[in-house]
Image (spheres, grey):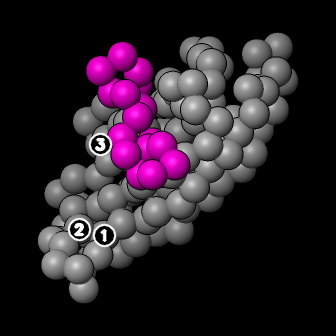
Amino acid sequence: CRRAGGDPEIYYHNSRWKLSNNQGLLVEFFPPKCKAWNFQLSNFWMESLDYRFHKISTNQDQAVINRDGLVSIIVCASDPGPDFPNWLTTAGHNCGAMLLRYVGAKVYPKIKTKLLDITKLKD
């Protein structure tokens, strides 16, 4: 991004996801000290999903952060319930891209992901 003329203050983590209706993707990270961070879901072409009618992103002001400072986001087709306040919907898509960006960070902590069976979460 920097070589393409992007803002040198912004650091990006980009990846892709592909889920069935019974699957969820757990994304976990410890946000570094920074001016701002946000996580966003996109379609196959990296175009934002429809944010007008679906919750497809979160940031430092919206996310519920665990007591230990960990952010746990779950990406899935349907609401997994109140135990997952940082649920983002796939908005009818079964695959796409995801982006986590930090503005003004000096360190870039690793991100952990885990595929989950959503049917077992709702029990």
What amino acid is labelled 1 in the image?
Tyr
> Is residue 36 depicted above or below 8 in this figure?
above
Total tally of numbered discs in the picture: 3
Q: Is residue 117 left or right of residue 24?
A: right
Q: Nearer the viewer, residue 81 or 66?
A: 81
Residues under numbered marks 1 and 2 in contact, where contact means CB atoms less than 8 Å apart: yes
**Secondary structure character of the magenta stretch overall:** loop
The quarter of the rendered structure image containing the N terminus is: bottom left
The residue where tag 3 is placed is: 60
The first of marks 2 and 3 along the sequence is 2
Number of residues whose C-alpha sits closer than 10 Å to that of mark 1, classed few (under 14), some (14–19) or many (20 or more): many
Range shown magenta: 41-56
Q: Callout 2 environment at 10 Å: few (<14), some (14 to 19), or many (20+)?
A: some
Task: Classify 81 as above or below 61.
Answer: above
Judge whether residue 48 is colored magenta.
yes
**Is label 2 in a helix, a strand or a loop?**
strand
Residue identified by numbered label 1: 11
The mark lying in front, picked from 3 and 1, is: 1
Above or below for 46 versus 88: below
Residue carrying label 2? 10
